[in-house]
Image (tube, coloured by chain):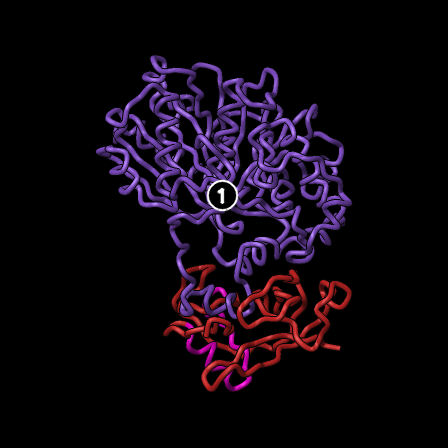
Chain colours: A red, B purple
Amino acid sequence: MRNAKPLPEPTPETQHFWDGTLVGELRLQRCDTCRKAYFPPRPFCPACGSRSVSIFKASGRGSLYSYVICHKEAPGFTPPYAIAVVQLEEGPRMMANIVECPQTPEALELDMELNVVFVKENDTVTLPLFKPAK
Amino acid sequence: MKPKSIAVVGAAETTELGVIPGLSQLGLHGDAALNAMADAGLKPSDIDGVATAGESPIRVAHYLGITPTWIDGTSIGGCSFLMHVRHAAAAINEGLCRTVLITHGESGKSWIAPTLPPARTPGSLEGQFEAPFGTVWAPSMFTIPVLRYLKHFGITQEQLALVPVIQREWAAMNPRATAKSAITVEDVLSSRMIAYPFRLLMCCLVTDGGGALILTSADRAKDLGRPVYILGTGESAESTMISQMSDFTSSRAFRVSGRKAFEEAGITHDDVDHLMIYDAFAHLPLYGLEDLGFCKPGEAAAFIAERNTAPGGRLPLNTNGGGLSYMHSGMYGMYALQESVRQMRGAAPAQVKGAKISVAHGVGGWFSGSSTIIFSNQAP
């Protein structure tokens, strides 16, 4: 397992997110009080502290906010591979890999439009990744 | 804290720097601590406060034969030692202890009995929302914001590459620097790619070393050698997840920490004669110069290109050569503090003539935490 990709272990506070990726949904949370969408998951609003929050299905649309292209070996990855931060349409940002796209500065253009894709790692874990919209 | 109520009375690095096969991590703490005590003319029995990071402060205290009445184990990365200075100043002023020893030691190169970094467990936020995407080491995380920074301000990779080139000029003047030979922008841009756009010469060194500081009240410092006074202090934090840093073009932790320190010191930027900005990677001096207020947003690269921070410039920056050329054991903040103290004592290899105020600014993690310490060599 030493060369396996490190996979997430859901906690009670994040279970809904990982349950969502299994069924092809990118689930975010929104504060019922201040209406702000946020990520990563937690059972309260990081903007105002309210415990009244709701889970919703995000559009899965975003844009490429920033990235690096790693040239060193990493468990589960073949270099060069890009680690990206995606600006989601709903406001929050999340880390992801960009798939179906050459891992080059020329192909990875900042602000390019992206759509979420769900990549199954095993029976219990599906990762949300992103691919170019066009 | 009240400016100049606290002074550094002992400051030293390990006897050797670079590759030190003869000392473990704890041994590096001990060597640096003994050197700092000798510098201050103090014995272990004179110390009643101990602070360290990346190592147990209890282990350090017992190893050195110290019985502390105050302990600080704040360990949030490379700027922990700057935070220790701030916390120690508050503790001494509050009467919790009289004389504080802050130690750092890291066998970053030789790996002799190192403290292993806390594993990112698969259930932690980083373990769930960053590690699965291949973030295994500092160069793959600390570097992520920079493409956004470059695009936002229209800065080129050539301008980024100038940062290590100019710091190497400072290192060339320092016999203890690990890397002293001159480099060009072309050398930087043709060095091995690590994590695009970062190449090897834009990344810090990996070395062994340590350092220690001794602080006491300004009143007691008068009887001890070469006091350097603490003028202002700041600290802040943002996120342990680089993906959740709120603005990739500016560090909130830098801005808040810097502002606190300058307000406390009651000085303006024009008063600053010497500056240290923790440079784990080439972009850190750019963010630091802007977020501390020395440059407007987006103007630091031009400021550096105009040689303002180079030898002979009006704001000498990272005069030991920095983490990029001097040394970087893993938590470099201690060496930024050491160089500020040397400059204030007039004892630096690349001494800034007549320097009276020095600012040391540190980062912990990847823009996760920050602390700023402002020094003066003028007695209260």
For this rendering, which residue is in front, A103 or B115? B115
Q: Is residue B324 above or below residue A13?
A: above
* Residue bearing the label numbered 1: B329
Q: Does residue B329 belong to the magenta stretch?
A: no
Magenta region = A14-34
Q: Quadrant of residue B180?
A: top right
Q: Amino acid at mark 1?
A: Ser
Q: Does residue A23 belong to the magenta stretch?
A: yes
Where does residue B304 sit, x and y in percent of width and height?
Answer: 71, 35
Where does residue B133 sit, x and y in percent of width and height?
Answer: 56, 69
Where does residue A73 sit, x and y in percent of width and height?
Answer: 58, 65
> Can residue A35 be seen in this snapshot?
no
Dot 1 crowding, Cα within 10 Å, few <14, some 14–19, many 20+? many
Give the position of the N terminus of chain B as an image quadrant: top left
Q: Is residue A63 above or below residue B95?
A: below
Circle 1 — which element?
loop
Residue at 44% over, 37% down = B210
Give the position of the C terminus of chain B as an image quadrant: top left
> Can residue A48 be seen in this snapshot?
yes
